[in-house]
Image (cartoon, rainbow, N blue to C red):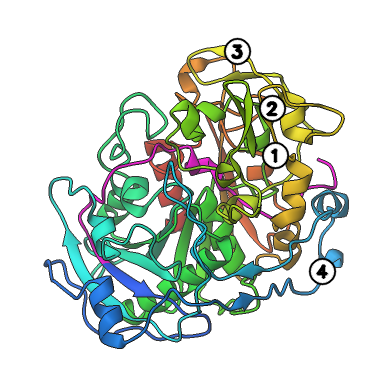
């Protein structure tokens, strides 16, 4: 790894999951407004019986406020540099070249196939439950959309908290599940097949997930679901903290076990490290922290395969995946067209993928570019490999143009800061990673370019996922053979390992 690996986590990981699907599990969901520095929540009881509450717009109108006004800035407080606490200084230096500049509270994501930069919005001053609803039985498409008041671009401060069956009477530990990018709690944890075949990392998908496994074993299980599936990891980290507040109040426990997957590793780790833009310190309320498929030393997957991602992302080519591309210009019918709204970079078109910027790190000094891509079905030579990765300087794009990974890292990676902040030694941390046989197409993630430049789970290098940098107490780690990034959160082997760790 080289010095240009700043701070960011896993965003594209689950961002590879196809768009679509509703909320389908046997859980109770509550919508909350979140606010930095508050430790309160509505005291109304969530039950396993369907209830009806006012919608997002009804509650907002009743309260006489509008969340769409001019926003406050979140100033990033990175915390002291603790280089003396780590032996891997050169690794951290590789990650330290760029330091981000701060965050603006706002509507920070877009829906698939269109862009919405939105305006910034003020930080809320308290929680407010919008209502609670039980989801059980058959699939109910769009339930999450309904929970957010049918608002296609809900306030970034709102999130769903799901209550699994047995949340109030389980005999074992209390667990909060944190999903990754381009995902939501139901698909990630309760119904891996909700978005259809291939959406779970293989050709056919199960209809039960880790949530059911943990609940059946006697754990009290909750899951957070964020308003924007590519959102700022600072906001996500704060919402994990506030979800823990609600869980502690509901259950009476002092500490919660947190399981983060993919981009959820980033947000979980950032809360545990107190990396929340100066709004909230870690409050000592996590017992075990299980990090699944996380970019603990960052990832460069988005930039690595030239134009191979473009067909899935850019609408010009029929793309529908809600994930950023590495190009802000495309050659369309012989003309260069601006497509900044789809790109990972901050620009006049918006700051739509801040959560992905935060996870970036350059790995080309460890694993050189391959010039080819493999989507689990075939391998092919990709165009514009070097210009995509290094930007329009020495190399020139033929089919697409972009500014390169170094430029993106400078705009917002937080990997170095996350490592420097460190996970407290009081937290028992566990790492769960996948390692694929890259010569066996049957184990690769079908339908998207896989990470084939070095040992990986198809998205994140094993060297990044299994890195111990900045972890105060590493209790255990496991690298599972031939279980890809999208299977790590539900596969029976992974579930068995997680249950073992929770029981220790």
Which type of secondary structure does the marked residue at label 1 adopt? helix
* Sequence-wise first label, 1 or 2: 2
* Sequence-wise first label, 3 or 1: 3
Q: Can residue 124 be seen in this snapshot?
A: yes
Residue 120 horizontal/vertical position (percent): 53, 70
* Sequence-wise first label, 4 or 2: 4
**Disc 3 to disc 1, how far (Cα)?**
25 Å
Range shown magenta = 1-29
Res. 463 mark: 1
Q: Are marks 4 and 1 in contact (CB under 8 Å)?
A: no
Mark 4 Cα-neighbour bin, 10 Å: few <14, some 14–19, many ≥20? few
Res. 454 mark: 2
Residue 223 horizontal/vertical position (percent): 36, 60
Q: Is residue 22 left or right of residue 99?
A: left
* Sequence-wise first label, 3 or 2: 3
Q: Are marks 1 and 2 in contact (CB under 8 Å)?
A: yes
Asked whether residue 15 is drawn in magenta, I would say yes
Q: Nearer the viewer, mark 3 or mark 2?
A: 3
Res. 189 mark: none
Q: Are marks 3 and 1 in contact (CB under 8 Å)?
A: no
Residue 445 horizontal/vertical position (percent): 48, 27
- Residue at numbered disc 4: 82
């Amino acid at each position: 790894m080289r010095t240009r690996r700043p701070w960011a986590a896993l965003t594209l990981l689950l961002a590879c999951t196809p768009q679509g699907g509703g909320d389908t599990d046997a859980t109770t969901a509550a919508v909350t407004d979140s606010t930095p520095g508050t430790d309160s929540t509505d005291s109304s009881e969530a039950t396993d019986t369907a209830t009806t509450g006012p919608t997002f717009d009804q509650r907002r109108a009743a309260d006489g406020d509008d969340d769409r006004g001019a926003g406050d800035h979140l100033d990033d407080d990175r915390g002291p540099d603790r280089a003396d606490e780590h032996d891997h200084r050169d690794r951290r230096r590789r990650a330290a070249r760029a330091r981000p500049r701060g965050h603006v509270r706002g509507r920070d994501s877009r829906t698939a196939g269109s862009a919405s930069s939105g305006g910034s919005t003020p930080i809320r001053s308290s929680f407010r439950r919008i209502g609670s609803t039980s989801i059980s039985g058959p699939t109910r498409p769009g339930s999450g959309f309904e929970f957010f008041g049918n608002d296609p671009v809900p306030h970034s401060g709102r999130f769903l908290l799901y209550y699994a069956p047995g949340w109030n009477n389980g005999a074992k530990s209390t667990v909060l599940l944190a999903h990754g990018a381009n995902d939501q709690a139901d698909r990630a944890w309760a119904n891996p097949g909700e978005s259809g075949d291939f959406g779970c990392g293989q050709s056919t998908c199960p209809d039960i997930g880790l949530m059911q496994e943990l609940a059946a074993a006697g754990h009290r299980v909750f899951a957070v679901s964020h308003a924007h599936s590519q959102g700022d990891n600072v906001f996500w980290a704060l919402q994990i903290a506030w979800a823990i507040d609600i869980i502690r109040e509901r259950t009476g426990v002092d500490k919660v076990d947190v399981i983060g997957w993919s981009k959820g590793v980033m947000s979980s780790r950032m809360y545990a490290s107190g990396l929340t833009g100066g709004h909230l310190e870690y409050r000592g309320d996590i017992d075990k922290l299980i990090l699944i498929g996380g970019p603990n030393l960052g990832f460069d997957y988005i930039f690595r395969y030239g134009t191979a991602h473009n067909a899935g992302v850019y609408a010009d080519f029929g793309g529908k995946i809600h994930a950023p591309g590495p190009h802000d210009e495309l050659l369309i019918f012989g003309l260069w067209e601006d497509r900044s709204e789809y790109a990972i970079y901050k620009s006049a078109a918006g700051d739509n993928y801040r959560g992905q910027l935060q996870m970036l790190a350059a790995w080309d000094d460890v694993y050189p570019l391959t010039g080819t891509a493999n989507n689990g079905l075939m391998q092919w030579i990709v165009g514009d490999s070097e210009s995509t990765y290094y930007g329009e300087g020495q190399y020139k794009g033929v089919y697409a143009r972009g500014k390169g990974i170094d430029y993106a890292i400078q705009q917002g990676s937080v990997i170095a800061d996350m490592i420097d902040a460190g996970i407290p030694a009081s937290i028992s941390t566990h790492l769960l990673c996948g390692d694929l046989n890259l010569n066996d197409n049957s184990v690769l993630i079908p339908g998207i370019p896989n990470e084939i430049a070095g040992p990986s789970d198809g998205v994140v290098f094993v060297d990044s996922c299994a890195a111990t940098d900045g972890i105060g107490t590493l209790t255990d780690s496991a690298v599972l053979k031939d279980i890809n990034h999208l299977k790590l959160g539900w596969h029976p082997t992974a579930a068995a390992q997680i249950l073992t760790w929770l029981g220790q």
